[in-house]
Amino acid sequence: MVVIDRFGSPLMSLRDRYAGLGALAIASGKAWTALNFTRDTSELIRAIKSGELSPGLVNLPKLVMLAGGLIIEAGRSLLGGVGVAGASGGDKDETSAKAGLASVQDKVEF
């Protein structure tokens, strides 16, 4: 898991000892992608599949178009992003990210 602030700078990272070598880089990319587009990465994937966004976006540097990247908002302000990687599927990464955000939401609300 990687948490970044609204400027894209890392605030924290946490890696399970059994996570793959690329897990932190992928998680960071998911967080950055969500923050950059101010949309969760699973929403971006749906927008590409529906034609709302260009499929060419997947080739841009730093973007990781995989589920598991969420924006962090409180008081209608964008605070940052969180990315989770390493589970056996983006849907599981996203579930973990949402659970993590829910557990601290009362602390980030203004």
Image (cartoon, rainbow, N blue to C red):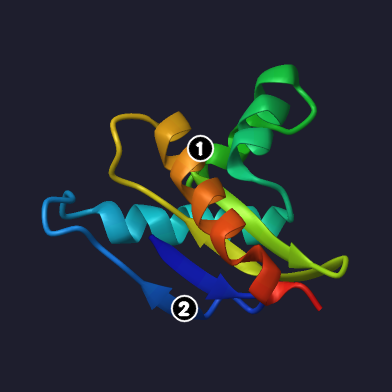
Q: Which residue is mark 1?
A: 67
Farthest residue in the top direction?
50
**60 relative to 105 in the view: left or right:** left
- Mark 1 residue element: loop
Q: How many marks?
A: 2
Which quadrant holds residue 80?
Answer: bottom right
Q: What residue is drawn where x is 55% and y is 59%? A: 103
Q: Position of residue 109 (x, y in %)?
A: 76, 72
Tell me: residue 57, above or below residue 10: above
Tell me: residue 5, above or below residue 40: below
Q: What residue is drawn where x is 66% and y is 57%? A: 71
**Looking at the image, can residue 65 be seen?**
yes
Q: Position of residue 82 (x, y in %)?
A: 53, 60
The amino acid at mark 1 is: Ala
Which quadrant holds residue 104?
Answer: bottom right
Q: What residue is drawn where x is 33% and y is 60%? A: 25
Q: Nearer the viewer, residue 60 or 106?
A: 106
Q: Position of residue 55 (x, y in %)?
A: 62, 30
**8 relative to 75 in the view: left or right:** left
User: Could you tell me which quadrant the N terminus lies in?
Assistant: bottom left
The amino acid at mark 2 is: Pro
